[in-house]
Image: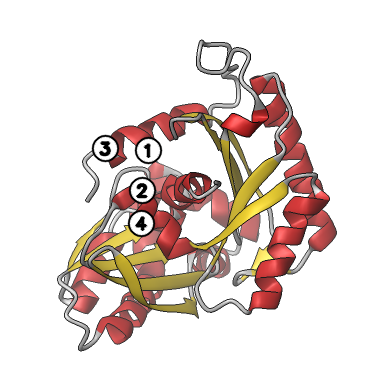
């Protein structure tokens, strides 16, 4: 794994702080053409991240939204409005307008839907310079040579197998963070939004684990099925759902394969998408 990944991800976390203005030497007088921008339209969260000319995180913004489901844009107008809002927030902190970006998509999504995602960017006045599948984006950060990168997102679990740094197999199946929240909401009799909040509260996670462990096991069984007979010796988990304590251990138990959860896994795919804006 890329030895610089942890530093990059920590810098990304700092860039996402909403009260941080960018007035340092890197950004002063910068032109929009020199930055790299990534837009991750996720099932649970949309992320906009800006990197400087040296691919170092500058500024970003994120918002919870239900505008995408299983990689498909289901609320086109809502997605455009949300992206425009995030773009305005980021531009206010940068001091100049953004003109272009890359975007990502889960493996296996039909090309028509990939075009729909790109059209969201265009409607928000961003030239879409690249469309990259999420496992390839994640590996731009991780630099995995051989193994599997598993993106446990809001709606789906995406599996990519790499050989010599190249993606040789991909798959994507429904089951992700949204399913965890639905189970929590049903078991506790709370709203979906409250379940989403509880899921991220550290003091709540120990009592929630027994409720959602079966969903984690489902994720593990998806991964196990797709890596079977493919000579995978390491699994790297990315995506926001990977942050829930115990997810890595459950996947490792279900697959029998060493499973690694890198730091700040929620930012890996957005960071990799931005790196592909060229």
- Residue 141 is labelled as 2
Q: Measured along the vertical axis of the image, is residue 84 above or below residue 68?
A: above
- Residue under the image location 75 percent in, 32 percent down: 88
Whole-Å distance between the Cαs marked 3 and 1? 9 Å
**Label 1 residue SS:** helix
Q: Earlier in the sequence, mark 2 or mark 3?
A: 3
**Label 3 residue SS:** loop
Q: Please name the residue that numbered disc 4 is placed on.
A: 139
Q: Are marks 1 and 2 in contact (CB under 8 Å)?
A: yes
How many residues crowd mark 1 within 10 Å: few (<14), some (14–19), many (20+)? many
Q: For this view, does 53 lie left or right of residue 193?
A: left
How many residues crowd mark 3 within 10 Å: few (<14), some (14–19), many (20+)? few
- Residue 236 is labelled as none
Residue 139, given in percent of the width and then of the height, sits at 35, 56
Q: For this view, does 212 lie left or right of residue 260?
A: right
Q: Earlier in the sequence, mark 3 or mark 1?
A: 3
Q: Earlier in the sequence, mark 1 or mark 2?
A: 1
Residue 90 versus residue 165: which sits nearer the camera? 165
**Label 4 residue SS:** helix
Q: Measured along the vertical axis of the image, is residue 228 above or below residue 117?
A: below
Whole-Å distance between the Cαs marked 2 and 3? 9 Å
Question: How many numbered discs, if any?
Answer: 4
Q: Are marks 3 and 4 in contact (CB under 8 Å)?
A: no
- Residue under the image location 32 percent in, 65 percent down: 149
Residue 45 in sight from this viewpoint: no
Residue 5, given in percent of the width and then of the height, sits at 30, 41
Q: Are marks 2 and 4 in contact (CB under 8 Å)?
A: yes
- Residue 9 is labelled as 1
Q: Quadrant of residue 75?
A: bottom right
């Amino acid at each position: 794994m890329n030895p610089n990944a942890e530093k990059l991800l920590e810098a990304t976390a700092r860039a996402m702080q909403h009260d941080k203005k960018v007035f340092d030497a890197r950004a002063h007088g910068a032109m929009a053409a020199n930055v790299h921008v990534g837009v991750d339209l996720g099932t649970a969260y949309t992320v906009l991240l800006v990197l400087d000319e040296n691919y170092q995180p500058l500024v970003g913004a994120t918002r919870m939204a239900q505008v995408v489901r299983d990689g498909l844009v289901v609320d086109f107008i809502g997605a455009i409005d949300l992206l425009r809002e995030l773009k305005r927030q980021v531009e206010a902190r940068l001091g100049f307008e953004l003109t272009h970006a890359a975007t990502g998509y889960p493996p296996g999504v039909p090309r028509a839907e990939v075009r729909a995602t790109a059209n969201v960017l265009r409607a928000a006045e961003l030239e879409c310079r690249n469309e990259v599948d999420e496992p390839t984006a994640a590996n731009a950060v991780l630099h995995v040579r051989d193994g599997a990168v598993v993106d446990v997102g809001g709606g789906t679990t995406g599996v990519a197998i790499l050989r010599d740094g190249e993606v040789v197999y991909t798959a994507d199946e429904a089951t992700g963070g949204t399913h965890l929240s639905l189970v929590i909401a049903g078991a506790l009799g709370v709203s979906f939004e409250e379940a989403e909040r509880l899921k991220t509260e550290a003091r709540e996670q120990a009592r929630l684990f027994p409720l959602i462990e079966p969903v984690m096991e489902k994720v593990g069984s998806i991964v196990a099925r797709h890596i079977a007979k493919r000579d995978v010796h390491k699994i790297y988990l990315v995506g926001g759902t990977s942050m829930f304590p115990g997810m890595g251990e459950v996947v490792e138990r279900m697959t029998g394969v060493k499973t690694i959860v890198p730091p700040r896994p929620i930012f890996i795919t957005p960071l990799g998408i931005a790196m592909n804006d060229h």
